[in-house]
Image (spheres, rainbow, N blue to C red):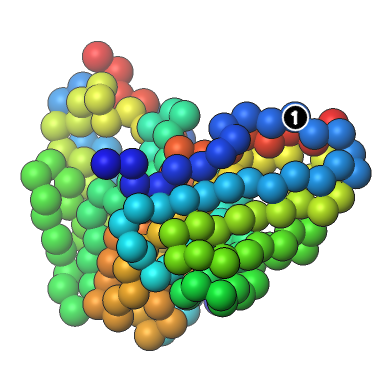
Amino acid sequence: NAGVTQTPKFRVLKTGQSMTLLCAQDMNHEYMYWYRQDPGMGLRLIHYSVGEGTTAKGEVPDGYNVSRLKKQNFLLGLESAAPSQTSVYFCASSRQSHSGNTIYFGEGSWLTVV
Amino acid sequence: QQQVKQSPQSLIVQKGGISIINCAYENTAFDYFPWYQQFPGKGPALLIAIRPDVSEKKEGRFTISFNKSAKQFSLHIMDSQPGDSATYFCAASMLIYGQNFVFGPGTRLSVLP
């Protein structure tokens, strides 16, 4: 019963390096999301996807790219990491619903850019 | 207009007391208001949610009170327990646009034994 799984859990990057955060969900959810969490800022949406092959920008998309080649996977890429991207990143998923639904979060990926 | 304001930033309550966290929003198009609970080192998890067609929803010790005219909603935790110590986020969304939530900044609750 894995739910939403993120890898890696911890990573330290040097400024300018690139990396990809991997997210997998086993609940057959249509919607997937990437959020970042910073102290006092709550959860801010970076990018989201409403289905396989689709992606859309959220509130804070600059400096990030995403891809959803398979329904169960949602990848978040940093092409040239900056110290401002030091944060905790959460992947999440939910079913398609217009009546209110639960977003299921992964356990987070702690990224430090030095 | 997309903001959700949340207060207090932190809250300390004695065991058995009542914890109250308040949220306010501006966008009247929001029609779904969940609360998420997050323990250290974990992702947030849905605690309780409400639609604006009701003024109150209760699940166990947790109650959401909703004031549509004031554009405010609050979480009440009755008989607070040390196990309730966590960060709580209120959120709002427009269901017609799917599940794109706007989250409040969070309240760190500490329940003293």
**Measured along the vertical axis of the image, is residue B65 above or below residue B7?**
below
Q: Secondary structure at mark 1?
A: strand
| Residue B38 seen by the camera | yes
**Residue at x 55%, y 58% (from the top left corner):** A74
Mark 1: few/some/many CA within 10 Å (<14, 14-19, 20+): few
**Measured along the vertical axis of the image, is residue B6 above or below residue B77?**
below
B98 or B50: nearer the viewer: B98
**Residue at x 34%, y 74% (from the top left corner):** A96
In x, y percent, where is residue B99? 41, 71
B26 or A89: nearer the viewer: A89
Residue hosting label 1: A12
Quadrant holding the C terminus of chain A: top right
**Measured along the vertical axis of the image, is residue B31 above or below residue A58?**
below
**Residue at x 38%, y 85% (from the top left corner):** B96
B49 or A9: nearer the viewer: A9
Q: How many marks?
A: 1
In x, y percent, where is residue A58? 61, 69
Mark 1 residue type: Val
**Measured along the vertical axis of the image, is residue B113 above or below residue B71?**
above
In x, y percent, where is residue A100? 27, 71
Quadrant holding the N terminus of chain A: top left
